[in-house]
Amino acid sequence: MNTRPAMAALAALIVLSTTGQALALDAYKDRRGFLLRVGVGGTSSQACGKECVDRHLGLGLRLRAGVGLNQNTTADFGLHITDSTGDGLSGLPGNAQRTVSGLFIGANYYTIGGAYARLTIGLSQFEETQPSVVGLRPPPVKETGLAYGGELGFEMFANADWAVAISVDMEVHEYDDGLSAKLLTFGITGTHY
């Protein structure tokens, strides 16, 4: 009995079914079209006025909406909010509450295997309030300025619609009178394409 035709048909069936799955997986990596991103991470922030104060540790939240221009490039508009507690700019003891937020436009460029680089620029809001100490309560610090930043990360597709990324980003926020804030965030981002 000649089993070659049966074996050839079985081999062709296995190859075709495997190829079909591989083609379906390639379709998952389509970044074109509308996208929504939500990210959260741990943030280290430092504010500098007349002098720099110790770094604050806090939580950063990123919300972005945009479009995939092609397979390697996305552009978006987003809101970044970072909230932290630590030493204040006034120099008085006590935990100051610091919120640094911004409206950004940004672009991601994806390279081999899901690695990407991101650049952002936008408007920033700095707010710091400190509790009263021995009857002294420094006035809250509120400033509006410009911000810019960069991010490096790695994105993996979880299914046909969602991708997950781990990243590190650095933002520099510049305000009047020499006030600045620097934020370093290690985070995770979910993107719906």
Image (cartoon, rainbow, N blue to C red):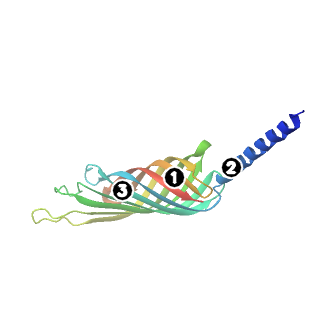
Q: Nearer the viewer, mark 3 or mark 1?
A: 3
Residue 163's spot in the image, x, y percent?
56, 54
Q: Is residue 56 above or below residue 124?
A: above
Cα–Cα span, label 3 and label 1: 21 Å
Is tag 2's residue or tag 1's residue first in the polypeptide sequence? Answer: 2
78 relative to 173 in the view: left or right? right
Instruction: Sort mark 2 into few (<14), some (14-19) or many (20+) by Cα contacts within 10 Å.
Output: few
* Disc 3 and disc 2 in contact, CB within 8 angstroms: no
Label 3: state its secondary structure. Answer: strand
Find residue 147 and report its image quarter.
bottom left
Instruction: Name the spot of residue 88 as percent of width and height, x first.
Output: 23, 56
Q: Position of residue 16 (x, y in %)?
A: 78, 45
Please provide percent x and percent y for residue 60.
Answer: 39, 57
Helix, strand or loop for disc 1: strand
Quickly name the residue at label 1: 119
Q: Which residue is mark 2?
A: 26
Residue picked out by circle 3? 59
